[in-house]
Image (cartoon, grey):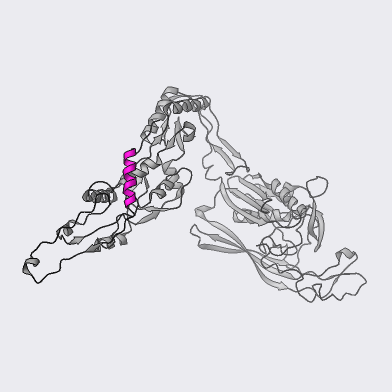
Amino acid sequence: MKKHGCSGIMKKSLAFLMALCFMLGVCATALAEPTASPDAAQTPAETPQETPADLPTQAPPESETEDPNRIIVIFDDGRIAAGVTVDGIPVGGLTRDEALAMLSPSEVPDVAVDADDPPAEEEEEEEEDPDASGELFDESQIELDQEEIVASLQLGHMYLNIDGYRQPEPLADFGVTLDMEGIVDEAMLIGRSGSISERRQAIDAAKAEGVASKLSFVYDEETVKAQTIKVADAIPRESVSYELKFDPSLAERFIIADGRSGFTPDNEGMQAAVLEALASGDVTNIVVPGQANGEPAEMLPEGTRENTVLIAKYTTKVDGSANRRHNVKQGASMINGQVIQPGEVFSVNDTLGPRDGSSGLWRKAGAIAMGISVSEYGGGICQVSSTLFNAVARADLEIVEWVHHSWPSSYVPIGCDATISTPGPDFRFKNNTDWPIYLVGVYDESTRRLTIEVWGRPLPDGITIDIKGERTATVGIPSSPRYVTDPRQVGPGRVGYRSKTTKLWYDAEGNLIKSEVIHTNYYRPQPNRVLKGTDPTPDPGDGGGGTDPVPDPGDGGGTIPPSPENPAPDPGDGGDPIPAPPVE
């Protein structure tokens, strides 16, 4: 095995030194007191004993060495000296364990690390009183972005340059590991070896000029050569067009690969290039020797990656019967994977088809028909269209058709639901962008949560959008009852509501930059329903007298009717279930 890093002796020395770091002490200045004897006044003070070389200390400034009575001991805090970097990543100010975690390919922690340039105010304080802190290392710190750290270190992969095509290959496949402990141990030794003066010089030099180290690799050359041949054999000899595949089952949702020309590698030259890169510690751009073949490949359209991102998503809690949850899951699966091209209008009804018993897809569950609760095929499907609305609105797509229920829903804020029925009403929106829009619909039975994601072009300048629904008024139950002939339709009335729906734009820093009321909604109150030919006087417990017979939906849902003062009739099938208490 070929290994780069600190020697065993160096590691043992470091362990010994670090054990002494737990010693505690004080920093003090001792001045000789004059005595009555003139001889005593002229007797030189005893020269202080030098701190043992084993204990990391900082030497006093030159101006103070002239005073033999002044003793300054600055204790080791167990951290790497300021200014030390590994592959360009600052590790100064970190403990050994923190540095190892920082450089680990499996997990990059969110820790603060030393800055190359400390804040001005800290420098000024040090200039005013260089002895006041008694610290061995600079404490000024910055916080690095985790993705930048991973990208800079290129941990876990080597990158092959095959005729301009950058191909990542896992280091583990080549039997290559990183000598993390060796490089961190070397970093820990800076300022901890030699005399006090030498240690001070090393610390000052690291802070002023920096000390750069590179990660080294541990590997077996024969194993690397064998894996290199396997990779070489897999390189396409003929041109390959780009790949753009939308797969909602993947965590990243897409497979995107650039097109590439055919290429015949020089196997021996490729083996040598890989080994040379590993020896140098830089595996970010290993140029593979060989011969390009075939016609130029069809390349990925410019801007594809930048315009295939998650724009918005929305999640709702799914309650109700097993049949209702089945319908929500079925609807989500039919939304999942849909692609809407630029200028195309997407219709929920067209996508889901009729909700009846003929297809075998839908089950009977609670729905709303003519203002009362019924059992219909596809009951609960409006939660899918309402969740979709909230995601689409936050993606700033154009809403073409949007109709509310006859009373607020419990799973979305008031003014933020979208009812559908066969053949209508419908929820429709248009892709008003220049790039395809991709929909992901996922129902998680374990959490009973429905999530819909919208992918495509990002909103400009880091903008995000939110939708807010608010109740603005409550309308009492009508005094005149509604007479019905079916005893199953007898029931208490409902209060009505007015609400408004507001669209809010936020900049990249989270500041509100724009606000617009996009709907004012009206939920018509429902009278008490009594059987024809009976006493119309409502029972005190049936919701009469202008009180709400169900839990107040608070911010529970609903959207605008065609006319706020003359709401459209409620859908007959596929509607919303009986509202439950508001879902948190």
Nearer-the-camera pick, 514 or 290: 290
Task: State left or right for residue 444 relative to residue 102.
Answer: right
Residue 212, how many percent across, how many down?
32, 43
Does the image show residue 6? no
In the image, residue 259 lies at what x, y percent? 53, 33
Main secondary structure type of the part rendered in magenta = helix
Residue at (44% x, 47% y) in the render: 101
The answer to whether residue 495 shows anywhere in this view is yes
**Farthest residue, direction right:** 533
Q: Residue at x 66, y 49 (%)?
A: 442
Front one among 192 and 242? 192
269 relative to 55 in the view: left or right: right
Quadrant holding the N terminus:
top left
Residue 540 position by quadrant:
bottom right
**Quadrant of the rendering where the C terminus is positioned:** bottom right
In the image: residue 373, left or right of residue 92 = right
Q: Residue furthest left?
A: 38
- Please tell me whether residue 49 is drawn above or below residue 473 in the rendered image: above
The one of 442 and 427 positioned closer to us in this rendering: 442
Rendered location of residue 382, percent (x, y) = 73, 55
Q: Classify 153 as above or below 131.
A: above
> How far across and down, in percent of the image, does residue 151 sit?
44, 43
The total of numbered circles placed on residues is 0
Which span is picked out in magenta? 1-20
The residue lying toward the viewer, choosing from 6 and 124, is: 6
Residue 76 within the segment the image draws in magenta: no
Residue 12 within the magenta-colored segment of the rendering: yes
